[in-house]
Amino acid sequence: MASKRIDGILLKEMFASGAALLVNNRDSVDALNVFPVPDGDTGTNMSQTITSAIKEINAKPYTSVADVAGAAARGALKGARGNSGVILSQILRGFSKALVGHEDIDGPLLAAALRSGANTAYKAVMKPKEGTILTVIRVIAEEAEEALDKQGDVVELFKLVLSVGDAILKRTPEMLPVLKQAGVVDSGGMGLMVIFRGMYAALTGEAVDAVAEEKPDGMAMPGEFVDDHDAIGEIKYGYCTEFIISHPREDMRDADVVRLRRRLERMGDCVLVISDMNVVKVHVHTNEPGKALQYALELGELDAIKIDNMMEERREREAKQAAEAAAKAAEQKDYGIVAVALGDGLTEIFRNLNVDQIVDGGQTMNPSIQDLAKAADATNAKTVFILPNNTNIILAAQQASELTERRVIVLPTKSVPMGISAALAFDPTVSAEENEAAMTEAAEAVHTASITYAVRDTNYDGQEIHEGDIMGMIDNKLSVLGGDIAQVCQDVTGTMVNEDSALITIYYGADTAEADAQALQSALAEQYGDCDVELQQGGQPLYYYLIAVE
C-alpha cells in the first residue's frame, strides 16, 4: 500500500485546522506567559499571525503544496506580531522554501521542510535562547530526520512530530529557570504544538473537540474564496464572471452542478460554484464569459450577471500607481521616523517631536510587520528610523524591511521613554549613521520603570507574587513588589536615581487620576532636589506609571 502524500488541497485544510485550533485556545496559551502582567499575549500574537497566513492562502485557489506554503509564509510575514509571531512566520517561511517546485509532500520532504523551518527561525533571532519555541521546532526537525530510516509515511511522521514536540515542550522548564519557577512550559512552544495538533487532525480526518466551530474574526475558513484581483499575477484569463442561477430547473440534480463546475474549470480558473439546489452562485475567471453563461443557462434562469475586464482594471490601476509613485518620488525626503506607542498623551508627545508616523501598539497590543512596513512607506522617506519602544516589537520591526523598499534602521528602544529620548536626539542635518549612533546613545542613557499589577499568583525570580500585587519593573526586570502604587513608584525611582541623574519624567496612565500623579511628582521633587521632575499625561492602558530617569 502506497504511503499517503499531502497535496495542496490537504495542506490548505491542515493549515486552516491548525489556525482554528490555536485561535480557540489562544487564551490558554496567553496564560502561560511567565510574567503575570495584564499584557501576556503570546497566544494572541501567534493566532493573529496564523490567521493572516490563512487569509493569504484563501486569496487564490492554490493547488500545489509549494503555492499553498508560499502563500502561508507571505501572509504570516505580513501579519506577524510580537516575537512569537515573528518566529512562527520564519518557521513557515523556511517550511515553504523546502517545498518550492513540489506538488505534494512525502515523508522525506516533510522532514526537510521542518528542518528548513527550524534553520530559518534560528537565523532570524540574533541571540537564540533554548527552552523556547526555537528548541521545540529544532528538536522536532532533528527527530523527524532520524526517523526517516524507519518510517517515511507522512501520517506516522506527523504523529512523531506531536509526540516529540510534546516531550521537548515538557522539558522547556529544565532549560529556562524562569519557566520552572513559574511552573509553566514555554508559551510559544505550546502555541506551535497547538497548530501542529490541528494540522494532524486534518491530515488524519480525526475530530478534534477543541477546534473552533465558529469562524474567527478576520479568518477565511476552508471553502471560502476571497477574490482579490490585485493579488493576481499574470492574467491568463481576462474576464471575472459572476452570476446566480436564481430559478434552477425542477429536475436539476447535484450531478448537473458538478458538470457545470467541471466545464468551467476546463475553460478558466478561480472557479467557485456553490449550490443549495434552490440557487446556484457561480464565479469564474475566463476568456469566454459568453460560453460560461451559455452552459449555466442549461440549468435555469440567470440573475445578477457581472463581467469585469480584469485586463483593463489592471491597466487603469497600474497607470494610477505610476502617477502616484512619480508624485511621491518628486517630494521624497531623506529621513522619516516611525514610533510605536499606545495612549493619547504618548501619541501627542511623539507628534510634537515631529515623528512622521505613530503606530498603535505597545505593552497591550503588538503591531504586525505589515503595520510597521506600511508606516515606513507612509513617511515617504528614503531612510526610516523605527522606534519599537518595546522588547516584544523589536524583532517584528527588524523584519519590516522585507515589506518595504525604504532603508529601515531599527533602534533598540525597549520603552516609550527610550523612544522619546531617541527622537529628541535626531538631527536631520547629519548622516543616517551619525543619527543611528546618537539616537541609540540617547536611548540607552534612559532607565525606565513600569508600574502595573499582577493578574495571577506565581513565583518569579525567587519572589512570591500574588494576584493584585503592585509590580515595579526596571528596564523590563521585576524590581519591587508592594501593595501601594505610590510607594512602589518611590521605591523603583530610588533604585534608578544616582549622583549623575538630572531628570525624572513621570508618564501617568489612563487608570491614574491626575491628582494622584501630581502628588507623586511633588513627593519625588522633594526627595530628589537635585533632579528636575516633570509630569506628562501618557494615557497608556494597564500601566499606572512609566517613570524615566536620565
Image: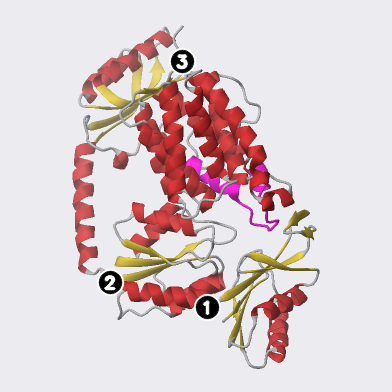
Q: Is residue 56 visible?
A: no
Residue 415 falls in image quadrant: bottom right
Mark 1–mark 2 distance (CA, rounded to whole Å):
27 Å
User: Which secondary structure, mark 2?
Assistant: strand
Q: Amino acid at mark 3?
A: Lys
Q: Amino acid at mark 1?
A: Ala
Mark 1–mark 3 distance (CA, rounded to whole Å):
59 Å
Mark 3–mark 2 distance (CA, rounded to whole Å):
55 Å
Instruction: Judge the density around disc 3: few (<14), some (14-19), many (≥20) Cα neighbours within 10 Å.
Output: some
Q: Which residue is mark 2?
A: 334
Q: Amino acid at mark 2?
A: Asp
Q: Is residue 359 above or below residue 518?
A: above
Residue 365 falls in image quadrant: bottom right
Q: Is residue 403 left or right of residue 387?
A: left
Find out whether the residues at labels 1 and 2 contact each other: C-beta distance under 8 Å.
Answer: no
Seen from the viewer's position, the closer of residues 188 and 302 is 188
Q: Is residue 98 above or below residue 265?
A: below
Q: Is residue 284 above or below residue 312?
A: above
Mark 1 and mark 3 lie on one chain; the one further toward the N terminus is 3
Q: Which residue is mark 3?
A: 4
Q: Which mark is residue 536?
A: none
Q: Is residue 530 left or right of residue 47?
A: right
Q: Which residues are magenta?
A: 27-52
Instruction: Judge the density around disc 2: few (<14), some (14-19), many (≥20) Cα neighbours within 10 Å.
Output: some
Q: Which residue is mark 1?
A: 445
Say which of marks 3 and 2 sits in front. Answer: 3
Q: Residue at x 69, y 72 (%)?
A: 512
Say which of marks 1 and 3 sits in front. Answer: 1
Mark 1 and mark 2 lie on one chain; the one further toward the N terminus is 2
| Residue 497 picture location, percent across and down | 65, 82
| Residue 384 picture location, percent across and down | 35, 66
